[in-house]
Image (spheres, helix red, strand yellow):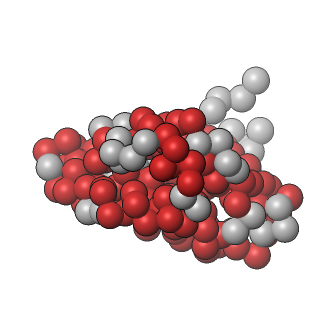
Amino acid sequence: MGLKTTASIQSNAQTILASNLKNLGLAYANIDAETFIKSMETQTHIADDLLRPAYAQLAQQTGSIATTQKIMATAFDTASGNSLDYAQTINILSQAYVGNRKGLKQLNTGLTQAQLAALSFDQLLSVLNQHFGGAGQAAVKGYAGQMDALTISLGNVQEILGGALLDSFAKLGGGG
């Protein structure tokens, strides 16, 4: 069994996302997806290895790149405003998109379950953006956000160096 490095894990995550998009008929959007994920990682300090599965999950639910990206942006502010985990918030919104509104109460919108059930999904996103818009950027500017940025940067450096070292070892070993 081969050695798995951070670089190979990232490469696997990219390959899996590309495969998921291809299976959904969205292969044309792979470059746009990777660009969006890299940009979101930089802006939100959420690691790309968390963003890729979220992107794949939402793309499978929505079948739309634009809707996937809109939900991911709303989830960032909503998670920050609620001190929830980003992946948990993605799961809640993914379920809400297909009609399962049970988890929405965890988002602390101040609305009753009946009010939440009566909203269209676009109305729900609008309510979340009204309640939590800007919470993500405020969180990024704080101490914890700056530490997350440092962690992301160090992780990216580690991926680059790890990949370069493995390539060097492979060359030294004759590629075997």
Given the current orientation, which residue lies at the most extreme top position? 1
Residue 10 visible in image: no
Of 71 and 152, the residue lying toward us: 71
- Give the residue at x 64% y 53%: 97
Of 21 and 156, the residue lying toward us: 21
The vertical placement of 87 against 156, above or below, is above
Across the whole image, how many numbered discs are drawn on residues?
Answer: 0
* In the image: residue 22, left or right of residue 139: right
Of 114 and 134, the residue lying toward us: 114
> Residue 59 appears at what percent x and percent y?
69, 58
The vertical placement of 130 against 175, above or below, is below
Q: Quadrant of residue 66?
A: bottom right
- Give the residue at x 40% y 60%: 127
Residue 125 visible in image: yes
- Give the residue at x 58% y 42%: 101
In which quadrant will I find the C terminus?
A: top right
> Residue 126 appears at what percent x and percent y?
43, 66
* In the image: residue 157, left or right of residue 159: left
> Residue 172 appears at what percent x and percent y?
63, 43
The vertical placement of 8 against 130, above or below, is above
In which quadrant will I find the N terminus?
A: top right
* In the image: residue 104, left or right of residue 8: left
